[in-house]
Image (cartoon, helix red, strand yellow):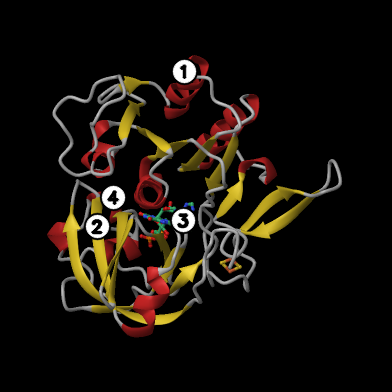
């Protein structure tokens, strides 16, 4: 068993597409169903782990469905698998369903939008190390930026299911309300903590929403809301911060956690090729034991989740 309590072995598996639903202008949720060995393997995977999906055989959408900014890159050949983490895992009998919350950003994610029920895709996974829940924590603060919401939604479910005594609050940030990757957003999202996001609220977790332009929730960066909350509360050793989002945001979250002496785990993102520690394309600079010295760890194998104290963020 590893630090994240993971008992599973990774493998190359065929997944059946159960659903693929558009939930926002550029956001979709893809459901993948597994049976047999794969179902057992994915049933034991942890929030923060990910899969590498092969999209090379998947068709492009029709021309009118290709966003203008992707027209030039749409028909690029997809040579490499792409990494995606899970926003939910459901086990039902001997079947396991994994959901991926994804944003259409380039040729592979564009092709993913044409997957439909009955298709199958090849995936490698589950990969990497997920979020770790240490003993003795009473409060978990989830801090998400943009697409970082996916793995923290999965973590929210695991915390509520397996650790019901831990109080969980979600700090959710995006540039604008249109870039909040959630379905059925209320017409007005207030500046206080509230049941604004159904995806967190289903686990009785309140959220504090911030957008850079103030189009939903607080007009601020999500780290501003986190800092204000910690100024008002008596957080200490029994609190833990979990974060996923852009690296500049993670660096600020790590700084706030450090100033408040709070444990913090961050899910890092790197361009990935192999996903299993062989190609060295996903290096994350980390502090070595000797003061002032650094070493490189592989995001795909040693991460993507790291203790925030060990990472040297590249800004
Ligand atoms: C561990 C991990 C988990 C991820 N989980 C999710 C997820 O749950 N949902 C989701 O939507 N995306 C996730 N991603 C990002 C996802 O892998 C990329 O968006 C996808 O590979 C884009 O492929 P593409 O061909 O559509 O676009 P590309 O043309 O490959 O990329 C589009 C743009 O995004 C940038 N980009 C792509 N991948 C990365 C990366 N890894 N780090 C920094 N910038 C990048 C590129 O530089 C480019 O500007 C994850 C990445 C990692 C490493
Ligand atoms: S993606 Fe190849 S070593 Fe990490």
Find the distance from the CA under tag 1 to the CA under tag 2.
32 Å
User: Alpha-carbon neighbours of circle 4 within 10 Å: few (<14), some, or many (≥20)?
Assistant: few
- Nearer mark to the viewer, of 4 and 2: 2
Quadrant hosting residue 28:
bottom left
Q: Within 8 Å: ligand 1 and the Cβ of disc 1?
A: no
Find the distance from the CA under tag 3 to the CA under tag 2.
17 Å
Q: Residue at x 64, y 29 (%)?
A: 261
- Nearer mark to the viewer, of 3 and 2: 3
Element type at mark 1 = helix
Q: Position of residue 179 (x, y in %)?
A: 29, 39
Image vertical order of residue 142 relative to residue 54, above or below: above
The residue tagged 1 is 228
Do tag 4 and tag 2 residues touch (Cβ < 8 Å)?
A: no
Quadrant hosting residue 280:
bottom right
Earlier along the polypeptide chain: callout 4 or callout 1? Answer: 4
* Label disc, if present, on residue 29 of the rendered structure: 2
Earlier along the polypeptide chain: callout 4 or callout 2? Answer: 2
- Nearer mark to the viewer, of 4 and 1: 1
The residue tagged 3 is 48
Do tag 4 and tag 3 residues touch (Cβ < 8 Å)?
A: no
The residue tagged 4 is 69
Image vertical order of residue 233 relative to residue 73, above or below: above
Evaluate whether residue 115 shows in this view. no
């Amino acid at each position: 068993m590893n630090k994240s309590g993971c008992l599973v072995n990774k493998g190359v598996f065929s997944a059946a597409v159960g659903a693929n639903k558009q939930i926002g202008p550029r956001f979709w949720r893809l459901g993948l169903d597994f049976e047999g060995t794969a179902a057992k393997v994915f049933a034991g995977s942890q929030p923060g782990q990910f899969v590498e999906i092969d999209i090379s055989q998947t068709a492009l959408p029709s021309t009118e469905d290709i966003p203008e900014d992707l027209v030039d890159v749409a028909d690029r050949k997809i040579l490499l698998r792409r990494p995606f983490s899970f926003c939910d895992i459901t086990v039902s009998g001997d079947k396991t369903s994994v959901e991926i919350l994804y944003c259409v950003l380039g040729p592979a994610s564009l092709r993913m939008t044409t997957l439909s029920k009955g298709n199958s895709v090849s995936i490698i996974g589950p990969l990497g190390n997920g979020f770790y829940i240490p003993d003795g924590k009473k409060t978990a603060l989830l801090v998400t930026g943009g697409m970082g919401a996916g793995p923290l939604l999965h973590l929210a479910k695991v915390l509520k299911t397996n650790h019901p005594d831990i109080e969980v609050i979600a700090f959710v940030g995006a540039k604008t309300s249109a870039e909040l990757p959630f379905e059925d957003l209320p017409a007005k999202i207030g500046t206080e903590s509230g049941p604004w996001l159904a995806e967190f609220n289903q686990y009785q977790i309140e959220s504090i929403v911030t957008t850079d332009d103030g189009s939903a929730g607080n007009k601020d960066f999500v780290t501003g809301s986190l800092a204000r909350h910690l100024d008002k509360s008596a957080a200490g050793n029994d609190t833990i911060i979990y974060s996923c989002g852009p690296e500049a945001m993670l660096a600020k979250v790590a700084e706030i956690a450090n100033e408040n002496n709070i444990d913090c785990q961050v899910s890092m993102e790197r361009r990935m090729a192999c996903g299993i520690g062989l190609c060295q394309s996903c290096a994350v600079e980390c502090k070595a034991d000797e003061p002032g010295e650094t070493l490189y760890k592989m995001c795909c194998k040693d991460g993507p989740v790291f203790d925030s104290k060990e990472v040297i963020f590249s800004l």
